[in-house]
Image (cartoon, rainbow, N blue to C red):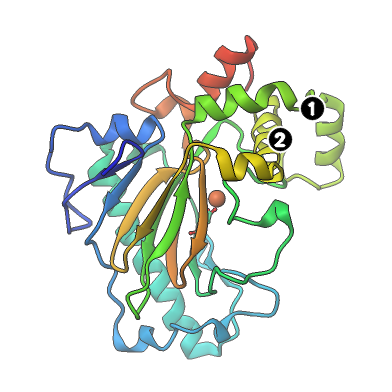
Amino acid sequence: MNRKIIELANTDWRHAPANGGVDPIMALETGKVLYFPAMPFTLNDVEKAFLTSTILAPKKRNISLDANGKLNGVLLDHEARYQLAAMLARFRGCASELIASLLPSYSAWLRLAPTSYRPMQVEGRAQSWRADDRRLHVDAFPSRPNNGERILRVFANINPQGLPRVWRIGEPFEEVARRFLPRLKVFSPWQARVMHALHITKTRRSEYDHLMLQMHDAMKADLDYQSKADQISMAFPAGAVWVCFSDQTSHAVMSGQFMMEQTFHLPVERQYYPEVHPLAILRRLTGRILT
Ligand code: SIN
Ligand code: FE
């Protein structure tokens, strides 16, 4: 393995990793990807029928189950909708058990975001550069400010033909921040207020949200950076699970089809280590308080 990915041998969602000399919590919180090569999310016969992108509603890339149990993005009738929702809910349960066993002190503080199922083939997907996840980026969303919360994600490759999901993983967050901070636009509090008033953002963007979004865009816009940045390619095999803070780990998806994903939000002050997260790094580098 390499220093961007920490491989763990567990095969059961409910068991904390055998300690192979690495501290998985420190690894995760410093931006590494925790990788479980054999932790399959197994579909039953009914669920296997959902392994097709034809069930996606027009113009949708993902199917999601929100925290209230509402299924979005799908073209299916009542019975099948119910079965697909149950599949996503089951994945949500597995991902929650994994995080609870891996990071027990997070559990009380996690806020559940939608569970997603991504049945589209990554290659050949047409989209704008800003939405193109084939370019290295850290996650930051234009309409959803983070309000001091982290983005923790659990991914599972469920490809039935055994095709891997191929990612690139880039340089550590601090290197990304050092490189891009000098190029970013200055934060405008009044503009953040206006965008919230006009419902362009769901809540008011903070200076931290602004910097993260600017960094996301600046990384994706820089083709020279895309090809020359320190990076590795990683083929996550079918049956694998991986976990990272996607607002910290520079990542891009290059190929694959059929993946489950669960997002959790965590208040930044609930991490195990206080000085290694993006907010702390950006505070240190800018000399500003940031929220
Ligand atoms: C992303 O979070 O950028 C995409 C990950 C994936 O679809 O594999
Ligand atoms: Fe992403």
Q: For the N terminus, which image quadrant?
A: top left
Q: Nearer the viewer, residue 217 or 110?
A: 217
- 51 to 236, vertically: above or below: below
Q: Is residue 67 visible?
A: no
Where disc 1 sits, the SS reads loop
Few, some or many residues within 10 Å of mark 1 (<14, 14–19, 20+): few
Q: Which mark is residue 10?
A: none
Using the numbered discs, state the Cα–Cα distance from disc 1 to disc 2 in whole angstroms.
Answer: 7 Å
Q: Amino acid at mark 2?
A: Gln
Q: For the C terminus, which image quadrant?
A: top right
Q: Position of residue 170 (x, y in %)?
A: 48, 40
- 148 to 42, vertically: above or below: above
- Residue at the limit of the structure toward the top, as seen here: 287
What residue is disc 1 on?
185
Q: Which mark is residue 214?
A: 2
Where disc 2 sits, the SS reads helix
Q: Amino acid at mark 1?
A: Lys
Residue at (63% x, 70% y) in the render:
125
Mark 1 or mark 2: name the one nearer the start of the chain: 1
Q: Position of residue 14 (x, y in %)?
A: 20, 54
Q: Position of residue 163 (x, y in %)?
A: 37, 73
Dividing the picture into quarters, in which one does residue 189 lie?
top right
